[in-house]
């Protein structure tokens, strides 16, 4: 990985961690479930699409540190999968589709690890775990859609300006 791509991955990882902090989120009410839309995925999408899959993987792993420490420890692996996947898909697809496809690759990992977290580590029953997972998956899907659209717009202008990190 070139120094330029590594530097960009570090910058996007730092930005992803900053964008994970609760005050930097838009509140979201899904029925009786209160959550927030975070934009940390945007930094990971930009990293993977602009600097490549390895930078996306690295940026995702480091960019998931805050949420791994404060929420669920498995988050870091999921965000690494997201960053690497979006970098791979971006070679063939437009950024918005690359982001959505990357979320489809990451979603099973999130579903399994969150279920394990809520049942084995937190001690919830299976029914309670599924009740928690449903709004989480809806929220993460909405975040992926919003961030993929934003990444598509941003990348259009970055490429138009002739900026490259690969």
Image (tube, helix red, strand yellow):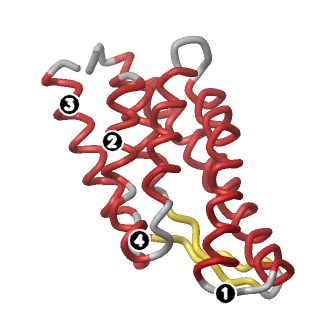
Give me the residue at 48% from left, 71% from top. Answer: 25
Determine the CA span between mark 4 and mark 1.
Answer: 30 Å
**Which residue is tagged 2?**
59
Determine the CA span between mark 2 and mark 1.
Answer: 32 Å
Disc 2 crowd, CA 10 A, few/some/many (<14, 14-19, 20+)? many
Give me the residue at 51% from left, 40% from top. Answer: 81
Lower sequence index among marks 2 and 1? 2
SS for callout 3: helix
Lower sequence index among marks 2 and 3? 3
Whether residue 152 is situated above or below residue 142 in the rendered picture? above
**Which residue is tagged 4?**
24
**Which residue is tagged 1?**
123
**Which residue is tagged 3?**
6
SS for callout 4: helix
Determine the CA span between mark 2 and mark 3.
Answer: 9 Å
Give me the residue at 62% from left, 48% from top. Answer: 144
Lower sequence index among marks 4 and 2? 4
SS for callout 1: loop
Residue 161 pos. (x, y %): 31, 18
Q: Quadrant of the C terminus?
A: top left
Of the pair 49 and 131, the residue shown nearer to us: 131
């Amino acid at each position: 990985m070139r120094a330029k791509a590594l530097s960009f991955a570090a910058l996007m990882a730092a930005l992803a961690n900053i964008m994970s902090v609760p005050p930097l989120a838009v509140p979201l009410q899904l029925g009786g479930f209160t959550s927030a839309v975070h934009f940390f995925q945007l930094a990971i999408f930009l990293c993977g699409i602009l600097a490549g899959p390895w930078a996306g993987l690295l940026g995702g792993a480091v960019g998931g540190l805050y949420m791994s420490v404060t929420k669920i420890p498995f988050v870091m692996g999921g965000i690494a999968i997201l960053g690497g996947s979006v970098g791979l898909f971006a070679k063939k697809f437009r950024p918005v589709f690359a982001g959505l496809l990357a979320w489809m690759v990451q979603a099973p990992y999130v579903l399994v690890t969150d279920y394990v977290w809520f049942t084995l580590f937190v001690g919830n029953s299976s029914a309670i775990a599924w009740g928690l997972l449903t709004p989480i998956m809806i929220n993460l899907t909405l975040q992926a859609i919003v961030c993929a659209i934003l990444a598509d717009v941003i990348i259009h202008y970055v490429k138009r300006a002739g900026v490259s990190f690969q």
